[in-house]
Each structure stands twice: as structure tokens, then as C-alpha cells.
Image (tube, grey):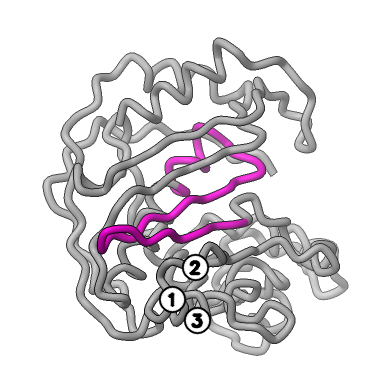
Amino acid sequence: MKQYLEFLDHILEKGSNKPDRTNTGIISTFGYQMRFDLSEGFPLLTTKKVHLKSIIHELLWFVKGDTNLKYLADNKVRIWNEWPYRKFINSPDYNNETMKEYIELIKSDDDFAKKHGDLGPVYGKQWRDFSGYDQLGNVISEIKNNPNSRRLIVSAWNPPQLKDMALPPCHLLFQFYVNDGKLSLQLYQRSGDAFLGVPFNIASYALLLMMVAEVCNLEVGDFVHTVGDAHIYLNHLEQVNLQLSRTPRKLPRMIIKHHDNIEDYQFDDFVLTDYNPHPVIKGKVAI
């Protein structure tokens, strides 16, 4: 995936050092776009191994409109753990539980999960219930019935509810486009953690595109990824340079089961083949 390596190079060459919300420090640039033709393969990074299981489960969580950590915890997906745990620490119910103990309580105690596992009206809530409106469901219906519409848009940015979200949406708006029997999708991401977050976002929205194409009986076209504040955290520079030293390998293939309704998708409906990445590169998430 040379597009992604070119993205990293662009940030390093054109970016500026800036302070950030997490006090980690970043190299940042504004406005970048990548394009992936999904007929060439599934855009999962090969210059480091990416944890696809987490991507699939998170996407299914979004699609179902879920906002509670329990589904993710039950499936050993850790990418959202820090935010509700930090909120729990500041609650009167906190009794020096470790992160591991907190997650076990989320998994084993439904009442605890309801009280301390909810992330607020994050992505899934906005996709499926934006002030009472099912954006994703209606967009899928519109693709089927009015494919030339220029209003095939889903937004996760709901300003009055931002204060109630564990984290305001980074990937906040996506638009579908139908042409010649092919479905394409463009994502606008206001803030992109280039090393840790963006590889997940690329794969997640490529997979969403494939799912909607199946439901609508269309072929897949392009995934276009537009990033506003594109940045590399200063504590990821070593990892980024290691990744840039590696030669990309052939993209894998993703095979997904056909469903008529997007809500019917389950984890076992996705099969990745021919994935031969370089070894994993770890990095600490900035909170």
C-alpha cells in the first residue's frame, strides 16, 4: 500500500511540530487524500500486521448502533477501553479496580456494564439514531432506489451531543457514490493518527463499502480517504521510520458473505486470504 507510505512521507516532509490535546506532541499537516481501488485487493497494511479482528468487531458494533463497551469486551477488542475506564476512575463506585478488573466486571455484570460501560452517543448511535433518524438504513434504501442521488451521506458529527461522547468522532462523515454498477465511498476524517488510527480507518471503511455493496447488489469501486488534521505523534516516529523502511507486499483479498440486510452480518461472514504482512509494530495510544 504505497498510498499509505506516501501519506506518512508527506506528513514528515510537509508537517509542522505542534502541541496537542494529549500533551504528547505531533507533526501535523492539513488536508490529504488517498484513493484505493478495491478491485486491486483489500487495503490492509502489509508493512505491519494489523489486527483485523478488532476492525471487524468494531465495525459490526457501529453498524448495530451499539455504544456499550460490553460487546467489544466480550470479543476481546481493547481499542475503546481507556475512555470509559478513565470515566469510571472518577466515579464514586471506583474502588481501585485495575483496567483488567474493570473489563472483567463489564463482561460478567450486566448492571455494571450498563452503568459504567456506555461511551455515550458515539458513532453507532449517530449512524443508526441521529436524533431519531436511521442514517445508515435510509442511505442504503436510497442507494437501492435512487442511486444517482448526491445526498448519500452519513454524519457522526452531532454538535449538541459532542459533550456526552467519550470521544468526539474523528472519522465523522462518509458519502456513497454509484456509477456503472459500482459503489464507491469517500470518508472525511477531521483528525487522523497516522500510525495507529488511520490503518484501522482505511480497512474499516473499505469493509463497510463492501458490506453495503453486497446488500445493494453492486460491485465495489473506490474508497477515497480524506484527512483534515493528519498527524504523527512524536512517540511514534521510530515506528513510522521502521515502517517506511519496509517494502509493501501484495494486498490480501477479503471474501464476505452476501446478506440482504446489513444488520445480519456476523464476524464469521468475513474471510481474509493471502495476507502476508511484515511483523507487527507496537505503539502507545495517546489519550
Look at label 2 and name its amino acid: Ser
Per the picture, the main secondary structure of the magenta-coloured stretch is: strand
Residue located beneath label 2 in the image: 149
The residue sitting at 31% across, 63% down in the picture is 210
Q: What is the spatial separation of the Cα atoms under label 3 and label 2, in whole angstroms?
A: 15 Å
Residue located beneath label 3 in the image: 137
Disc 2 to disc 1: CB gap under 8 Å = yes
Q: Nearer the viewer, residue 211 or 182?
A: 182
In the rendered view, tell whether residue 265 sits above or below residue 77: below
Residue 5 point in image, percent of width and height = 39, 24
Q: Nearer the viewer, residue 98 or 209?
A: 209
Query: Which disc is residue 253 wearing?
Result: none
Start and end of the magenta stretch?
173-201
Residue 36 point in image, percent of width and height = 33, 41
Q: Secondary structure at mark 2?
A: loop
Residue 224 point in image, percent of width and height = 43, 44
Residue 263 point in image, percent of width and height = 40, 83
Q: Secondary structure at mark 3?
A: helix
Q: Residues within 10 Å of mark 1 (few under 14, many from 20)?
A: some
Q: What is the spatial separation of the Cα atoms under label 2 and label 1, in whole angstroms?
A: 6 Å
Mark 3 or mark 2: which comes first in sequence? Answer: 3
Residue located beneath label 1 in the image: 146
Q: Nearer the viewer, mark 3 or mark 1?
A: 1
Q: Residues within 10 Å of mark 2 (few under 14, many from 20)?
A: some
The residue sitting at 31% across, 77% down in the picture is 215
